[in-house]
Image (cartoon, helix red, strand yellow):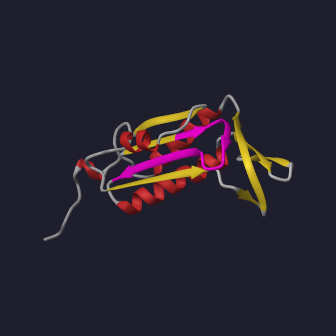
Amino acid sequence: MALTFDHPGERAAADPIKLLAIRETPLSVDEVFRVVGDDASGGTTLFVGTVRNHDGGADVDGLGYSCHPSAGAELRRVAEKVVANHPVRALAAVHRVGDLKVGDIAVVVAVSCPHRAEAFEACRRLIDDLKHEVPIWKHQTFSDGTEEWVGAC
């Protein structure tokens, strides 16, 4: 007897993009995890990016994120591309702008899919494309008084 997987839960949801935002306020991992909950999903992958205390061999005191006015539209385009290429049941992505301290959450993305491998792959694509294609820039301040701008795209 051959097994077939023709259940509707094996396919992408009709409207899987649940939350996209660029915010000046602290981000909530719980909020993002909650909105990607889906009874047909066997795998949910969540990535949390935080401000680390070093970069390129130098100590980081803090950083600020800023974005181009088109960043929201570009974030949607990236999410739609992930949804078009993976069986996504639910997707969320939020990025912080403004001044952040070491340890603060800078970005949270999550994807739910029918199976774990699909969820890992879709989440990886989402965060990688967000960082490379959405016009959000990072201004780092180092302990030695130097600073640098890092362009995400």
**Picture layout, residue 86 above or below residue 56:** above
Give the quadrant of residue 72.
Answer: top right
The reply to whether residue 137 is visible in this rendering is: no
> Viewed as shown, does residue 59 lie left or right of 105?
right
- Image x and y of residue 58, in percent: 79, 59
**Picture layout, residue 19 above or below residue 90:** above
Give the quadrant of residue 116.
Answer: bottom left
Give yes or no for residue 108 being in the magenta stretch: yes
Question: Magenta segment, principal secondary structure?
Answer: strand
x 47%, y 54%: residue: 122
The reply to whether residue 111 is visible in this rendering is: yes
Give the total of numbered labels: 0
Q: Name the one closer to the observer, 47 or 54.
A: 54
x 74%, y 53%: residue: 60
Q: Residue furthest bottom?
A: 1
**Which quadrant is the N terminus positioned in?**
bottom left
**Picture layout, residue 67 above or below residue 138:** above
Give yes or no for residue 137 being in the magenta stretch: no
Please state the extent of the stretch shown in magenta in the rendering: 94-113
- Image x and y of residue 79, in percent: 51, 42
Q: Name the one closer to the observer, 52 or 48.
A: 52
